[in-house]
Image (spheres, rainbow, N blue to C red):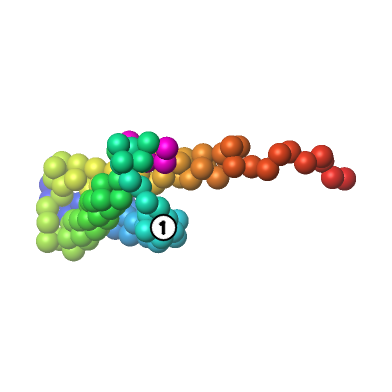
Amino acid sequence: MGDEGVGALYPDLYTTCAQVLPVLMLALLWESRFLERIQRQSRRPRREDSRDGVRFWTKRRAGLYASFVATMSVLGTAVAILVLAGLLADRPAVRGLVLGCLLLTLATLLTRTLIDIADATRTDRDEPDAPMQR
């Protein structure tokens, strides 16, 4: 293979990641109102609050994880842009990093979406079923 230019074999990978990662980060942190919900919740450890406490995702851990995902999303975007600009060579390790950032962000978004769906459709908070109106 000759010198076919930066990212010649995977040009769409870098272009897509450079465009998609910032949008996913916005969806994770702002559009879903995640930060507002975390701020409102007490999220105390179960050992301190046996009824409403959380087993693992305390406010501090949730904040650290959200910060990690946001950092990795920005890092993946920056690396993709650097490859597209010709300042960083397209190598398997670079592709792996960009894909890893994308997959982490997508997995986090999917997890949060499923949790939000489960929370929104919980039946223990619903009012008793009313007769169907026609």
Q: Secondary structure at mark 1?
A: helix
Q: Residue lying at the far right in this picture: please name it.
A: 134
Quadrant position of the N terminus in the picture: top left
Q: Which residue sits furthest bottom?
A: 85
Q: Quadrant of the C terminus?
A: top right
Q: Quadrant of residue 33?
A: bottom left
| Residue at 59% across, 42% down | 125
Query: Of 134 and 27, which appears nearest the observer?
Result: 134
Identify the residue at image location x=12%, y=61%: 87
Q: Position of residue 22 (x, y in %)?
A: 33, 59
Quarter of the image holding residue 47? top left
How crowded is the residue under tag 1: few (<14 C-alpha within 10 Å), some, or many (20+)? Answer: few
- Relative depth, front residue between 76 and 117: 117
Residue at 51% x, 39% y: name it.
Answer: 118
Is residue 103 visible to the viewer in this orientation of the structure? no
* Residue 5 x/y as whole percent: 17, 55
Looking at the rendering, the stretch of residues picked out in magenta corresponds to 51-55
Q: Main secondary structure of the magenta part?
A: loop
Q: How many marks?
A: 1
- Residue at the spot 47% in from the left edge and 40% down from the top edge: 114
Residue type pointed to by label 1: Arg
Q: Is residue 36 above or below residue 1?
A: below
Q: Is residue 75 magenta?
A: no
**Residue that carries the numbered disc 1 in the rendered image:** 40
Task: Tell me if residue 63 can be seen.
Answer: yes
Where residue 45 sits in the image (x, y, percent)?
31, 41
Camera-side residue of 36 and 87: 36
Residue 43, percent from left and from top: 35, 47
